[in-house]
Structures are given as structure tokens and as C-alpha cells.
Image: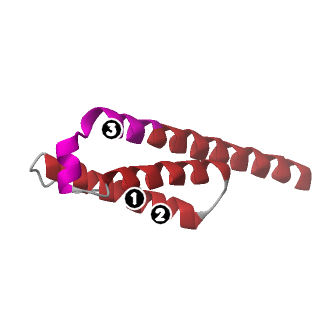
């Protein structure tokens, strides 16, 4: 029936939204830990925009939590890829970035 289909749809969408918000929060937490615990002043010499890079990525995590926006989600993934590349370059390693999907 239409009612059952609507209930199933709303249940699915609410689960997707909950997962999206949980993952955005987890990404923000992990970015902040990496930013504050790993990166040191010497890394700022190599990457002078490091603080701005992390700050903008954290803001994108927040934007992704509060809205359903493919643009924000894509920008967040791009920011995370950039941070991934910076992190591994500080360890003199070339580690391929990949996503789960």
C-alpha cells in the first residue's frame, strides 16, 4: 500500500541521514586528532596553509552533518584526499587514496 511504501521510504531516508551525520562527525573527530596530535611546526614550513586546510575540512564536516548536499560532501572528500596526500608525504610515502564505494 502507499502508506507502507511511505513508511519504508521514510525509514530508509532517516537511516541514511543518521549514517551521514555519524560519518561526518567521525571524520571531523579524526581530522581534529590528526591536526592537533600529529602535525608539528616543521610541517607548517612544508605546508604553510595546513591550519587553513584542516579548518576548512572541519567546517565541511559540519556542513555535511547539517544538510544533504552533494556539493559539500564532494568538497569534503576532496579535502580529505588532500589531507591524506599531505599526511603521507610527511612520512615520505606514496600511499594511494581510495574510497569505499
Residue highlighted by disc 3: 34
Q: Are marks 1 and 2 in contact (CB under 8 Å)?
A: yes
Left-right relation of 40 to 61? left
Residue 21, picture quadrant = top right
Left-right relation of 7 to 24? right
The residue shown at (53%, 39%) is 25
Among the two numbered marks 1 and 3 on one chain, the one whose residue lies closer to the N terminus: 3
Cα–Cα gap, marks 1 and 3: 14 Å
Residue highlighted by disc 1: 79
First to last magenta residue range: 29-46
**Quick check: is 38 in the magenta stretch?**
yes
Left-right relation of 17 to 55? right
Residue highlighted by disc 2: 75
Cα–Cα gap, marks 1 and 2: 6 Å
The residue shown at (64%, 41%) is 18
The residue shown at (72%, 45%) is 14
Where is residue 77 shown, x and y percent of the image? 42, 58
Where is residue 35 shown, x and y percent of the image? 34, 40
Give neighbour class at mark 3: few <14, some 14-19, many 20+ (Cα, 10 Å): some
Left-right relation of 96 to 15? left
Give neighbour class at mark 2: few <14, some 14-19, many 20+ (Cα, 10 Å): some
Residue 29, picture quadrant = top left
Amino acid at each position: 500500500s502507499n502508506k507502507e511504501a511511505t513508511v519504508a521510504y521514510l525509514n530508509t531516508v532517516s537511516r541514511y541521514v543518521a549514517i551521514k551525520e555519524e560519518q561526518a562527525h567521525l571524520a571531523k573527530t579524526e581530522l581534529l586528532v590528526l591536526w592537533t596530535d600529529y602535525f608539528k611546526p616543521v610541517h607548517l614550513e612544508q605546508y604553510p596553509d595546513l591550519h587553513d586546510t584542516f579548518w576548512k575540512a572541519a567546517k565541511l564536516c559540519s556542513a555535511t552533518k547539517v544538510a544533504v548536499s552533494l556539493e559539500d560532501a564532494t568538497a569534503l572528500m576532496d579535502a580529505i584526499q588532500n589531507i591524506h596526500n599531505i599526511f603521507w608525504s610527511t612520512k615520505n610515502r606514496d600511499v594511494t587514496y581510495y574510497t569505499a564505494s
